[in-house]
Amino acid sequence: MMRRLVPLAFLAPLAFGFTTETPLAAADANLSKIKLPAGFTISYFAQGVKSARALAVGPDGTVYVGTKDDKVYALPDRNKDGRADEVVTLATGLKAPNGVALRNGALYVAEINRIIRYDNIAQRLRQKPKPVVVYDKLPNKDWHGYRYIAFGPDGKLYVPVGAPCNSCEPEEPIFGTINRLNADGSGFETIAKGVRNTVGFDWSPVDKALWFTDNGRDMLGDNLPADELNRLPAPGLHFGFPYFFAGDVADPQLSQGKDAATYTRPARKLGPHVAALGMKFYTGRQFPAQYRNQIFIPEHGSWNRSSKIGYRIMLVKLDASGKQATSYETFAEGWLQGQKSWGRPVCLLQLPDGSLLVSDDQNDAVYRISYKG
């Protein structure tokens, strides 16, 4: 049964900022549309988080939220009741600060053209702190410009640069890549090429290989090409863009003279045009054991199809080696009703208690999925 929670909008507005006015009945009606496996429930962790995108959590449990707008938010949950106490606006006036990551008490934020850092952020939530510029040589291109960032097992900060087009020969080598750099901004290097647009990646808890989603090109019809789930076991691979998509779909203009066999094929084909975004390995203990070390993928939803698909969270199961994808199935759905969506899942975050947060940049919300059996 779905838990009925009073949304934050119905609490007295606090000094640092609620921006939501979602009626209780409408909020509950929307959540009741979400279908989950038996034993799982979904609730609002926070509402009024405009254009909520990437998520990160600090040691004290505060959740940080990047956006495709101009703001970065913090969502403290001091009493650990599974709902944010307030929505704090940390920063404004930024250029689509989609990506957020934490390291040594500092919040790293990825704008389209640069990466900045807010030091000692937990003690400065309400001070509108001035950022330190970490790296300012990212291309200033809006098309596929939302940056997803995360620190890897090697301690380096990973950042992709999407293609500035639907499909084209990149005008500079930096486009269509995944890169990494040191936490201080030095040592920038490209580790993967031929990546059209990834806005989500994570590392396998089994062998530390990097896995990432990639969005296929548009304008090849409803069912071509599939989005991709890829595995990068070591730097240096090329994943086919702009010549081939999903391993075997040739670009009609750019593939001449190219051999699909020379590029790395996806670990798993996903749905066509589903806009697979902020994937995560589940490593917690709250969900049943069959979900451990498996991949959850939010699908933002299609626009380049005559009928919409996506708008859901998918589960990709891996074999015991952690290297082979064996299935691709729906975990949570209901944000799309008929051909009208009321929400679009973007990114996932596992909380210390093992529950899973989901951001939604259409419904301006962050949800919490938990399991009680």
Image (cartoon, rainbow, N blue to C red):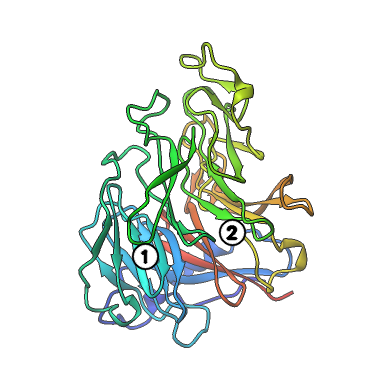
Residue 122 percent location from the top left of the image: 35, 79
In-front residue for pair 111/135: 135
Q: Which mark is residue 33?
A: 2
Q: Of the residues shown, which amino acid type is indicated by label 1?
A: Val
Q: Is residue 114 above or below residue 303?
A: below
Which SS class for mark 2?
Answer: loop
Which SS class for mark 1?
Answer: loop
Residue extending farthest to the front is 187
Q: Is residue 282 above or below residue 257?
A: below
Q: Is residue 4 above or below residue 133?
A: below
Q: Of the residues shown, which amino acid type is indicated by label 2?
A: Lys
Q: Horizontal placement of 172 versus 324: left or right?
A: left
Identify the residue at horizontal 48%, vertical 51% (top origin): 344
| Front: mark 1 or 2 | 1
Residue 277 percent location from the top left of the image: 51, 48
- Image quadrant occupied by the C terminus: bottom right
- Image quadrant occupied by the N terminus: bottom right
> How many residues crowd around disc 2 within 10 Å: few (fewer than 14), some, or many (20 or more)?
some
Residue 334 percent location from the top left of the image: 58, 53
What is the CA distance from the residue labelled 1 to the residue labelled 2? 21 Å
Question: How many marks overall?
Answer: 2
Q: Which residue is mark 1?
A: 49
Identify the residue at horizontal 40%, vertical 68% (top origin): 64
Q: Is residue 216 above or below residue 53?
A: above
Residue extending farthest to the bottom is 79
